[in-house]
Image (tube, grey):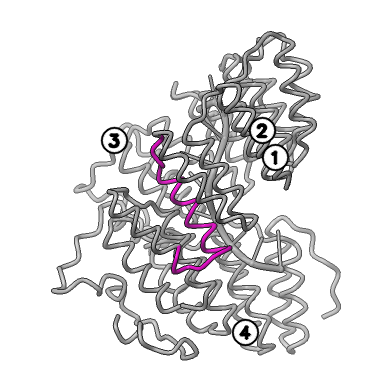
DNA sequence: GTAGGGTTAG
C-alpha cells in the first residue's frame, strides 16, 4: 500500500491478480473470513453449464431456505439468465423445495428486466397456482419494468387490471403506480390519466399529492408543483413536512436558488417542522452551486437548533466539498464524522473515492476502496464503476480492464453501466484489438441479459468495420438481431 | 413497494 501511496500519479498502477490486494492494508494480516454460503453457491452457479447446474442444486448439504435462495438470486442479479435458470431448476424440485413468494418476486423482476415479459407473467401464473400471490408488490415490480422498457401504458394497464390478478386496488396501490410513473418522468400521464380520473375514487391523500408534486419537481416544473400544492390546500388537505421538503428540493433542482432560500425562510417563519431532511436539502442545494460558506453556515445553524446531522447530511457535505472545494477538505469532514461515531455507508465511501479520482489521486482512491472492506462496507458495483471509469479516462485502460476482470468471478458482477463504461473507452486508442474487445464485451453483456442501446451496437459495428474486422462485425449483427433490435442494414 | 434528504459525467 505504501508504495502505491508514494508513487507519482503519472505512473501506471498495477493491480495484483490476487484479490487479497484489497484487504492487504491491515497488519498483521488476518486470515480472510470464509465467504458466505450464498457467495460460494453463486460462484459455482456462474461457473456451471446447463449440464452441471442440476448437480449443484442437488447437493444434500445445502438447505434451500427462502433467505438463502433470495441472497443467491441477489448475488446473480447482474447475470439474469443464470439467476433465472437457477430459480427455474430449484422451483421445479418441489415438494423438496418450497419456493417463497419473495423469491418469485425476485425472479419476476429478473425476467422483466431482461424484457422477457412472457416469462415474467408465466412466473406470476405459477405463483398464483401455488397460492403465493401475486401481491400488489409483484405487480408493482412488473409495472416498473414496463416503464423502464418504455411502455408506461402497459404499466397503467397492470394497475387497472389488478383485480384480475386477485389483488385489490386501494389507495396504497394507487399511490404506488403514481410514484412509479412520476419517478420515471411520466408525470403528465400520472396526473392526467390516473390522478385526475381516479383521485376521487381512491380518496387521494396527502401522499398522493406529494407524489405528483415531486414528479413535477423532478422534471423541474416547479410552477406545476406549486399548483398541486394549491389544489391540495383547496381540498382541505394539510401539507406535511415532506410536502415542504419536496418543494424546497424542487427549487434547488430547477436552479431557483433564491426561491429555495425564500421558501426555507418562510418555512421557519411559519413554524413549519424543519427537520434533518430540510437541512440536508439546503446544505446540498447551496453547496452544489458553489456556495460552500452558506452551506457550512446552515450546517452550523442546524447544530444550534439541536438537530443532529445524519449520515446523508455528512454525505451531502462531502459531495459538495469534493465538487466545489477540495477533496482534502472533504476527507476532513469524513474523519470528523468518524470521530463523532457515525458509520459511513457505501455512498460516503463512493463520494470520497470519486473525489480522489477526480483530483487525479487514483492510488489513494484504490487505497480507500480497500479500506471499505476493512470497515465492513464491501465495495459495490458503483465503487468499481467509478474507479474503472477514471482509469479509462486517464488512459490507463489496462488497469480498468484488470479491475473489470476481478468482478467477473462473482464477487461483484458488472452491471450495464460497467459494460457501457468499458465499451466506450475501447474507442479512444483506435486499436483493432480494442474494438475486438468491445465486440466481445457487447456479446457478453447480451449473454448476461442486458439490453445494450442501439447506439452502442452501431458504434461497435462501425469501429469493427473501420479496423477491418468484417467477420466479427457479422457476428455482432447476429447477436443484435437476437437481442431484440432490428439489425441495421450493413454492407459487409 | 404510499411520499421527502447523500452516489457518474456528458
Name the side, left or right, on which A429 lies relative to A491. left
Observer-side mark, 4 or 2, equals 2
Which stretch did the figure color magenta?
A307-329
Instruction: Note whether residue A146 is visible.
Output: no
- Residues at marks 1 and 3 on the same chain: yes
**Residue of label 1:** A251
Q: Which label's residue is closer to the chain start, 4 or 2?
A: 2
Q: In x, y percent, where is residue A484?
A: 72, 55
**Residue of label 4:** A434
Observer-side mark, 2 or 3, equals 2
Mark 1–mark 3 Cα distance, whole angstroms, equals 56 Å
Magenta segment includes A326: yes
Residue at position x 35%, y 56% from top?
Answer: A42
Magenta segment includes A331: no
Observer-side mark, 4 or 1, equals 1
- Residues at marks 4 and 2 on the same chain: yes
Frontmost residue, A42 versus A2: A2
Label 2 lies in what chain? Answer: A
Name the side, left or right, on which A442 lies relative to A490. left
Q: Which label's residue is closer to the chain start, 1 or 2?
A: 1
Q: Within 10 Å of the Cα at label 3, are there few (<14), some (14-19), or many (20+) other Cα atoms?
A: few
**Residue of label 3:** A96
Amino acid at each position: 500500500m505504501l508504495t502505491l501511496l508514494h508513487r507519482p500519479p503519472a505512473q501506471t498502477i498495477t493491480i495484483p491478480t490476487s484479490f487479497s490486494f484489497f484487504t492487504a492494508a491491515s497488519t498483521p494480516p488476518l486470515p480472510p473470513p470464509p465467504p458466505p454460503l450464498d457467495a460460494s453457491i453463486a460462484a459455482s452457479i456462474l461457473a456451471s453449464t446447463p449440464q452441471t447446474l442440476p448437480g449443484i442444486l442437488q447437493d444434500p448439504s445445502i438447505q434451500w431456505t427462502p433467505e438463502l435462495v433470495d441472497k443467491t438470486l441477489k448475488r446473480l442479479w447482474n447475470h439474469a439468465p443464470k439467476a433465472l435458470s437457477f430459480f427455474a431448476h430449484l422451483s421445479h424440485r418441489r415438494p423438496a423445495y418450497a419456493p417463497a413468494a419473495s423469491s418469485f418476486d425476485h425472479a419476476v423482476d429478473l425476467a422483466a428486466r431482461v424484457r422477457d415479459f412472457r416469462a415474467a407473467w408465466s412466473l406470476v401464473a405459477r405463483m398464483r397456482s401455488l397460492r403465493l400471490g401475486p401481491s400488489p408488490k409483484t405487480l408493482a415490480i412488473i409495472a416498473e419494468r414496463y416503464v423502464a422498457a418504455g411502455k408506461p401504458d402497459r404499466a397503467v394497464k397492470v394497475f387497472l387490471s389488478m383485480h384480475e390478478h386477485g389483488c385489490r386496488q386501494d389507495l396504497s396501490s394507487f399511490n404506488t403506480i403514481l410514484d412509479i410513473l412520476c419517478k420515471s418522468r411520466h408525470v403528465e400521464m400520472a396526473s392526467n390519466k390516473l390522478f385526475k380520473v381516479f383521485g376521487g375514487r381512491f380518496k387521494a391523500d396527502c401522499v398522493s399529492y406529494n407524489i405528483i408534486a415531486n414528479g413535477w419537481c423532478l422534471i423541474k416544473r416547479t410552477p406545476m408543483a406549486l399548483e398541486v400544492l394549491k389544489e391540495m390546500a383547496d381540498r382541505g388537505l394539510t401539507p406535511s413536512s415532506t410536502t415542504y421538503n419536496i418543494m424546497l428540493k424542487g427549487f434547488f433542482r430547477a436552479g431557483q436558488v433564491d426561491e429555495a432560500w425564500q421558501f426555507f425562510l418562510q418555512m421557519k417563519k411559519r413554524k413549519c417542522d424543519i427537520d434533518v431532511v430540510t437541512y440536508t436539502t439546503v446544505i446540498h442545494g447551496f453547496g452544489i452551486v458553489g456556495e460552500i460558506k452558506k452551506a457550512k453556515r446552515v450546517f452550523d445553524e442546524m447544530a444550534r437548533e439541536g438537530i443532529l446531522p445524519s449520515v446523508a447530511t455528512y454525505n451531502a457535505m462531502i459531495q459538495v466539498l469534493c465538487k466545489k472545494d477540495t477533496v482534502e477538505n472533504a476527507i476532513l469532514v469524513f474523519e470528523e464524522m468518524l470521530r463523532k461515531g457515525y458509520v459511513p455507508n457505501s455512498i460516503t465511501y463512493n463520494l470520497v473515492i470519486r473525489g480522489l479520482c477526480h483530483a487525479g489521486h487514483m492510488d489513494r482512491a484504490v487505497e480507500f476502496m480497500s479500506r471499505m472492506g476493512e470497515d465492513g462496507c464491501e465495495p459495490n458495483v458503483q465503487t468499481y464503476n467509478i474507479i474503472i471509469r477514471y482509469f479509462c479516462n486517464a488512459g490507463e485502460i489496462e488497469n480498468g480492464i484488470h479491475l473489470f476482470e476481478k468482478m467477473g468471478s462473482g464477487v461483484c458482477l458488472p452491471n450495464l453501466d460497467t459494460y457501457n463504461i468499458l465499451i466506450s473507452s475501447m474507442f479512444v486508442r483506435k486499436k483493432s484489438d480494442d474494438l475486438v474487445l468491445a465486440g466481445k464485451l457487447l456479446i457478453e453483456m447480451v449473454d448476461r441479459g442486458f439490453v445494450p442501446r442501439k447506439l452502442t451496437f452501431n458504434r461497435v459495428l462501425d469501429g469493427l468495420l473501420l479496423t477491418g474486422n468484417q467477420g466479427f462485425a457479422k457476428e455482432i449483427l447476429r447477436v443484435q438481431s437476437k437481442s431484440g433490435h432490428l439489425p441495421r442494414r450493413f454492407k459487409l
